[in-house]
Image (spheres, grey):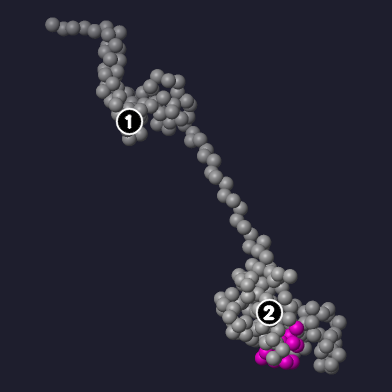
Amino acid sequence: MRTSFTRKQIGLAVACALALGLASGAARAQATASGWLQDSSGNAITTGNGSCVHAGTPATPRSTPRCDPDYRPVAQSLPIAPPAQSTSMAPSQVLTFDADILFDNDKSTLRPSGRRTLDNFADRIRNINPETIMVVGHASRPGSERYNQRLSEERAESVKTYLMSTGIAPYRVKTSGRGETQPVTFAGECLNEMTAKAIACRQPDRRVDIELIGARIPR
């Protein structure tokens, strides 16, 4: 006996089958924020023809990439990191020492007066704990540039060695020599000769600068 079904009956049967299939998986299905059903693994639940199944609430456009063809992800605002503290804001102080007090003329060995000067300096910074102590040697213009560069470096190293002997940690002390490249006197202000007057005129150029980085000596 052949049984015939109308188009309306076939549609009703398909709808019932879908309903039963969805009901059997109801315990494992959940609705997304837009109302599309998905399983416990987060996969969209679809019908036999690949259509997504909606829970019955209005859909939110662009909310699910699998179910919304025009899906566009919502841009997430990232937290703004606080600006990094600039090292240039660290306190610093430059002290200038007369090379004629620290050393004999044309020498890099500390004089007794130079050692006393550095002892006083070490006592003043003992409790402020600077991050870095930069020792920079300078020379006056007479003599070759190469010679003055070497002399300025040797004098800076002598100051570093003595500061370490007073108990200052070696890793805190850095040295540099600038030779005759950074004079204090103006060009033509002092004669480039070895008379007593010219030597005295160039005295400010013969110096050792000590920069404290990360601290200042209290007044």
Q: Quadrant of residue 139?
A: bottom right
Is any atom of residue 14 visible in this view? no
> Which three-letter amino acid code belongs to the residue tagged 1?
Asp
Residue at screen point 69% across, 71% down = 217
Helix, strand or loop at disc 1? loop
Q: Quadrant of residue 197?
A: bottom right
The magenta stretch spans which residues? 98-110
Find out whether residue 104 is within the magenta segment.
yes
Viewer-nearest residue: 73 or 83: 83
Q: Is 14 placed above or below 169 here?
A: above
Viewport quadrant of the C terminus: bottom right
> Which three-letter amino acid code belongs to the residue tagged 2?
Phe
Is any atom of residue 23 visible in this view? yes
Give residue 199's position: percent from left, percent from top. 82, 89
Residue at screen point 24% across, 7% down = 5
Viewer-nearest residue: 4 or 46: 46
Write down the residue under mark 1.
39
Residue extending furthest toward the bottom: 195
What label sits on residue 196 in the rendered view? Answer: none
Q: Is 67 placed above or below 121 here?
A: above
Viewer-nearest residue: 44 or 197: 197
Q: CA distance from mark 2 to mark 1?
A: 76 Å
Find out whether residue 67 is within the magenta segment.
no
Q: Quadrant of residue 145?
A: bottom right
Q: Nearer the viewer, mark 2 or mark 1?
A: 2
What label sits on residue 121 in the rendered view? Answer: 2
Majority secondary structure in the magenta region: loop
Q: Residues within 10 Å of mark 1 (few under 14, many from 20)?
A: some
Q: Is residue 22 left or right of residue 213?
A: left
Residue at screen point 21% across, 7% down = 4
Residue at screen point 65% across, 79% down = 122
